[in-house]
Amino acid sequence: MSHLRTIVFAASALVAVAATPALAQSTFDGGYVGANAGYDWFNARQRATVGGQQSTPARETQGFNGGLFAGYGQTVYDNIYVGAEGEANFYTGDRTYGDALGTYRVQPNYSAGVSARLGYVVQPDLLLFGRVGYQHTSIDTTNALTGGASRQYAQDYDGVKYGVGADYAIDEHLFTRIEYDYTDYSHSTRDLAGGQLRSTPDESQVRVGVGIRF
């Protein structure tokens, strides 16, 4: 699935949810906003090429993350839940590593995305869900390849996010959340003084959150 098709799919899901009357009301129907926090593993998967030699320094940049989310959903058939959600996140990870061909510093900065959610209300106060959507992430990078000067730049990546999680309703309006997400990003190639650097990143997140339904 291309990134464009993912965006269209998520947007279509939101329109469908807004236009479809609920067949069975549940605690999780309606709009909501919330905040989350968790831990992140970002792997830039950088491969340097200098003078015909290649290296693959696959090192993860780890750190805490936090963000905000908002969305809408409803039960559309029996206990089946359909919804769409937008989010914005920030990161604290910062790692510098190196090999014979150079040094590499990776600092995830911020990300934003939209996704469709499909779930099942297994109990009146418990919703299990999966998600798929589009994610845009900005990474601050500093590289110095052998024979070239150090160069700092911001690199933006677009990717497809997949995730699973659970929402637990504390009362009619307040709920908590736990989830795991994985994002597969598009690759990038950048010419640097002394050689070339190719990145094929991916990202894993574990997050907990709290939200208010209205």
Image (tube, helix red, strand yellow):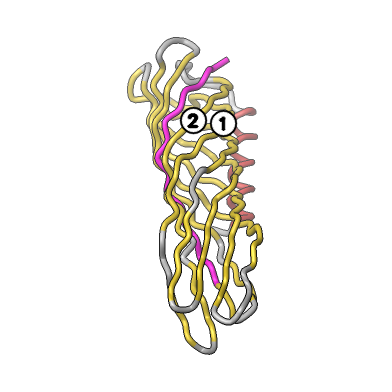
Q: Position of residue 2 (x, y in %)?
A: 58, 59
Question: Amino acid under label 2?
Answer: Asn
Q: Are marks 2 and 1 in contact (CB under 8 Å)?
A: yes
Image quarter in which the C terminus is found: top right
Question: Percent position (x, y) of residue 118?
Answer: 46, 36
Instruction: Give the amino acid at mark 1.
Output: Phe
Dominant secondary structure of the residues highlighted in magenta in the image: strand
Q: Is residue 124 above or below residue 140?
A: above
Q: Quadrant of the N terminus?
A: bottom right
Q: Identify the secondary structure beneath mark 1.
A: strand
In this rendering, position of residue 165 left or right of residue 138: left
Vertical relation: 37 (above or below) 147: above
Lower sequence index among marks 2 and 1: 2
The percent position of residue 161, horizontal first and vertical second, equals: 50, 48
Foreground pick, 143 / 126: 143
**In which quarter of the view is residue 12 placed?**
top right
The residue that disc 1 covers is: 69
Q: Residue furthest top?
A: 172
Q: Nearer the viewer, residue 185 or 8?
A: 185
Answer with left or right where residue 128 lies relative to residue 70.
left
Q: Name the residue under label 2.
A: 36
- Magenta stretch, residue numbers: 198-214
Q: Is residue 37 left or right of residue 90?
A: left
Tag in front: 2 or 1: 2
The residue at 46%/33% (across/down) is 37
Where residue 162 appears, x then y in whole percent?
46, 47
Give the residue displayed 41% in from the left and 62% down from the top. Answer: 59
- Nearer to the camera, 51 or 19: 51
Tell me what residue is drawn at x 60 percent, y 55 percent. Answer: 140
46 magenta-colored:
no
